Image (cartoon, grey):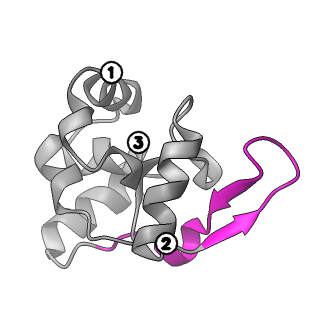
Amino acid sequence: MLDIVDSIPPGQVLSYGDVAALAGTRAARAVGSVMRRYGHAHPWWRVVRSGGLPPAGHETQAREHYDAEGTPLRAISREPGYAVEYAVARWQPLHPDAQQERNTHSR
């Protein structure tokens, strides 16, 4: 899973569910567990919650990365006050098998 996270380009994101699908599973919570335990050495801010919300508890640090990478953001009325513009920032891997796998699992 961490190799998938490492492959997300700067300024783009995937959801926990997308990462799980690319890894061949539906276990989005397992992705969260892996990120919580090992994600500090990887671009953790590029994996977002549903609706484009940044990782819980890391909103301020994630915002610094988003601003530095030019990740498209939108204002929201609840905390943390912003979300990633997911439809624009969602990474689309070029590998056709990965794309098909993600589409199959993200439904």
Compute the Cα span from label 3 to label 1.
Answer: 10 Å
**Label 2 sits on what residue type?**
Thr
Tell me where the magenta segment starts and ends, as one range: 73-92
- Left or right, 62 with reference to 43: right
- Left or right, 16 with reference to 80: left
Residue lying at 39% horizontally and 69% vertically, measured from the top left: 12
Foreground residue among 64 and 77: 64
Query: Taking the image as drawn, is residue 29 in sight?
Result: yes
Residue lying at 71% horizontally and 68% vertically, measured from the top left: 74
Helix, strand or loop at disc 2? loop
Q: How packed is label 3: few (under 14 Cα within 10 Å), some, or many (20 or more)?
A: many
**Screen quadrant of the N terminus:** top left
Give residue 41's position: percent from left, percent from top: 18, 38
Compute the Cα span from label 1 to label 2.
Answer: 24 Å
Helix, strand or loop at disc 3? helix
Tell me the number on the disc at residue 16. Answer: 3
Give residue 25's position: percent from left, percent from top: 25, 36
Which is more N-terminal, label 2 or label 3? 3
**Label 3 sits on what residue type?**
Tyr
> Circle 1 is placed at which residue position?
33
Q: In this view, does 55 lie above or below 93?
A: above
> Does 91 lie within the magenta span?
yes
Q: Are marks 3 and 1 in contact (CB under 8 Å)?
A: no
**Label 1 sits on what residue type?**
Ser
Residue lying at 57% horizontally and 72% vertically, measured from the top left: 87
> Circle 2 is placed at which residue position?
71
Query: Taking the image as drawn, is residue 49 in sight?
Result: no
Q: How packed is label 1: few (under 14 Cα within 10 Å), some, or many (20 or more)?
A: few
Farthest residue to the right: give it: 77
